[in-house]
Image (spheres, rainbow, N blue to C red):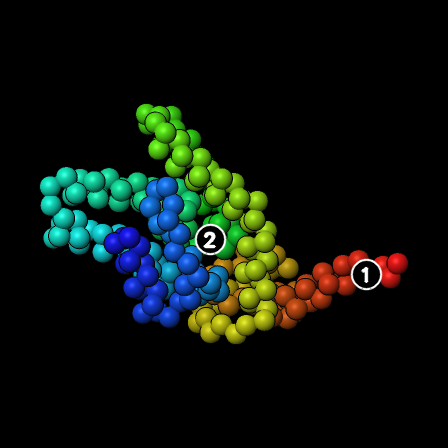
């Protein structure tokens, strides 16, 4: 809870909307109701605040066995496995060098690989099985929702105004190359803004939805 308090404190400072705090087998998890397109640096500040607060308590407040216990929890939390903080750091780094969709997929599949090695290397006990099972279900669920998450990313870009300073030019209609913290210009028979491209795409999608029968 001390660790999670660090996340929550920074989220409140940055005025992020907190939906709930869930108690899970490996600790706690704060759920936010925020745009995917919030600045990467804000998400990074929230992600790093938890480990920093925990480290402060570990070395300046905790005594005896609590120190080693806290460090063990912190080390586990920094593994690059979704939904642990380590996976958030990995995803934020990947967002700086590649598209949003590709960084999301890479993070989730890397989580599966790391989880496999964790199972191979660790000794089994009831708590370990519970934690690994829970994490595996979460990872699989997120993999199944990749397109939903990506479509939400696109929809936010179409209906909301984000003031990104960095510009990226994309050849063709490849929206899969869109990145966080960038505004985009698409080179398609001239140049079009991302809002124009996304509006056209969403209009075509809506027109292709079957009409409900009156019978």
Q: Position of residue 143 (x, y in %)?
A: 53, 44
In this rendered view, identify the residue nearer to me: 59 or 23: 23
Instruction: Please tell me the numbered disc located at residue 43.
Output: none
Q: Residue at x 63, y 66 (%)?
A: 198
Q: Residues within 10 Å of mark 1 (few under 14, many from 20)?
A: few
Q: Residue at x 31, y 55 (%)?
A: 4
How many numbered badges does the structure rendering display?
Answer: 2
Residue wearing tag 1: 211
How far apart are the two marked residues, 1 and 2, measured between alpha carbons?
38 Å
Against 105, is 197 above or below? below
Sequence order check, earlier mark of 1 and 2: 2
One can see residue 125 in this view: yes
In this rendered view, identify the residue nearer to me: 163 or 177: 163
In this rendered view, identify the residue nearer to me: 28 or 156: 28
Q: Specify whether 66 is left or right of 143.
A: left
Q: Residues within 10 Å of mark 2 (few under 14, many from 20)?
A: some
Q: Position of residue 29 (x, y in %)?
A: 38, 52
Residue wearing tag 2: 98
Q: Position of residue 20 (x, y in %)?
A: 42, 58
Secondary structure of the residue carrying numbered label 2 = loop
In this rendered view, identify the residue nearer to me: 165 or 76: 76
Do residues under tags 1 and 2 come within 8 Å of each other at their CB atoms? no
Against 107, is 114 above or below? above
Secondary structure of the residue carrying numbered label 1 = loop
Q: Specify whether 136 is left or right of 9.
A: right
One can see residue 37 in this view: no
Quadrant where the C terminus lies? bottom right
Q: Nearer the viewer, mark 1 or mark 2?
A: 1
Q: Residue at x 59, y 58 (%)?
A: 151
Q: Residue at x 81, y 60 (%)?
A: 212
User: What is the quadrant of residue 207 in the picture?
Assistant: bottom right
Q: Specify whether 187 is left or right of 25.
A: right
């Amino acid at each position: 809870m001390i660790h999670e308090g660090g996340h929550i404190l920074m989220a409140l400072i940055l005025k992020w909307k907190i939906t709930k705090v869930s108690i899970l087998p490996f600790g706690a998890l704060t759920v936010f109701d925020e745009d995917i397109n919030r600045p990467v640096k804000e998400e990074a500040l929230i992600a790093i605040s938890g480990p920093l607060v925990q480290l402060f308590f570990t070395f300046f407040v905790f005594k005896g066995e609590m120190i080693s216990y806290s460090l063990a929890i912190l080390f586990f939390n920094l593994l690059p496995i979704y939904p642990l903080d380590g996976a958030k750091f990995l995803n934020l780094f990947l967002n700086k060098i590649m598209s949003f969709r590709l960084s999301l997929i890479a993070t989730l599949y890397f989580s599966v690989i790391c989880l496999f090695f964790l199972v191979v290397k660790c000794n089994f006990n009831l708590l370990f099985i519970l934690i690994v099972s829970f994490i595996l279900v979460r990872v699989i669920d997120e993999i199944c929702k990749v397109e939903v998450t990506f479509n939400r990313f696109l929809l936010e870009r179409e209906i909301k105004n984000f003031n990104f300073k960095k510009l990226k030019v994309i050849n063709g209609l490849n929206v899969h190359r869109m990145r966080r913290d960038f505004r985009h210009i698409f080179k398609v028979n001239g140049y079009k803004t991302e809002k124009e491209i996304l509006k056209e795409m969403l209009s075509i999608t809506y027109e292709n939805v079957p009409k409900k029968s009156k019978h």
